[in-house]
Amino acid sequence: MKRSLQFLKYHFPEYKAPNKVITYIGPLDGYGDILDEDAFLVGLHHHLGSTYSMYESMLVLETYPTYISRRFTPETIVVNCISNVLNDMFPEQLEDKTLIVQMVEKGKKLYALQQLIPEKDEHYLIGYTQKQLKECYENEKNIWALFTQNNYLQSTDFNINKNYVGESPRTMELGEASPGNIGSFVGWQIVKKYVSKKGNVSLKELMQTPAETIYTVSKYKP
């Protein structure tokens, strides 16, 4: 956590992050990690390991299905804390935006998370298993085709867009083993392509760059 806060201070010096961590134990079906004005509140009950038996109880499953609770490991503490910071700095207002804008905006946060926690494996950042992320990279071209061939990129239809950004157990068109939130994965790759083309771009500048600009400049085509 200390190293990530140092990176945060370097990239966003104006942001006043909490300077202490408070751990607590709450109900398993309750809140987990919370950003408070004065502290990072870490719910240890949400970091007992993905195989903890009580996570499979009906009480917990009603709130946190297995594809969520498998992330309840110690490795996700810093990820959740820094994600909360990014959401505080850059609150989402995406309801009426096109799907491609939503994808890139979520990709920007994943890219920022990667820069602030560089030692953390990518699958922890997006909430996939290692196998799921590996297969996403292997099938990146087919995933992109899902959006382009169905003309989804400029969609503002909530019922369509919700299938590809945000939490879900799978992406139906890609099979039972596929992860959800596949649009955020693609948005992340678009942002990486944009940064590689632009070269020296600060994280602060990136986060302030319009999503449409990032998509256009990236010329993303896996």
Image (cartoon, helix red, strand yellow):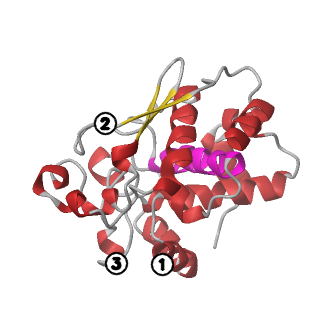
Residue at left offset 61%, top offset 64% = 121
Q: Which quadrant, please, contains the N terminus?
A: top right
The residue labelled by disc 1 is: 131
Q: Give the quadrant of residue 210.
A: top right
**C-alpha gap between disc 2 and disc 1:** 28 Å
Relative horizontal placement of residue 74, taking residue 4 as reference (left or right): left
Q: Which quadrant, please, contains the C terminus?
A: bottom right
Q: Nearer the viewer, mark 3 or mark 1?
A: 1
Residue 196 rendering spot, x and y as whole percentages? 80, 58
Residue at left offset 57%, top offset 49% = 104
- Numbered range of the magenta stretch: 99-116
On whether residue 186 falls in the magenta region, the answer is: no
Badge 1 crowding class, 10 Å Cα cut-off, few under 14, some 14 to 19, many 20 or more, is few
The residue labelled by disc 2 is: 31
Helix, strand or loop at label 1? It is: helix
Give me the disc on residue 177: 3
Residue 38 rendering spot, x and y as whole percentages? 54, 18
- Residue placed most toward the observer, 120 or 208: 120
Q: Is residue 176 above or below residue 80?
A: below
Residue 171 rendering spot, x and y as whole percentages? 34, 68
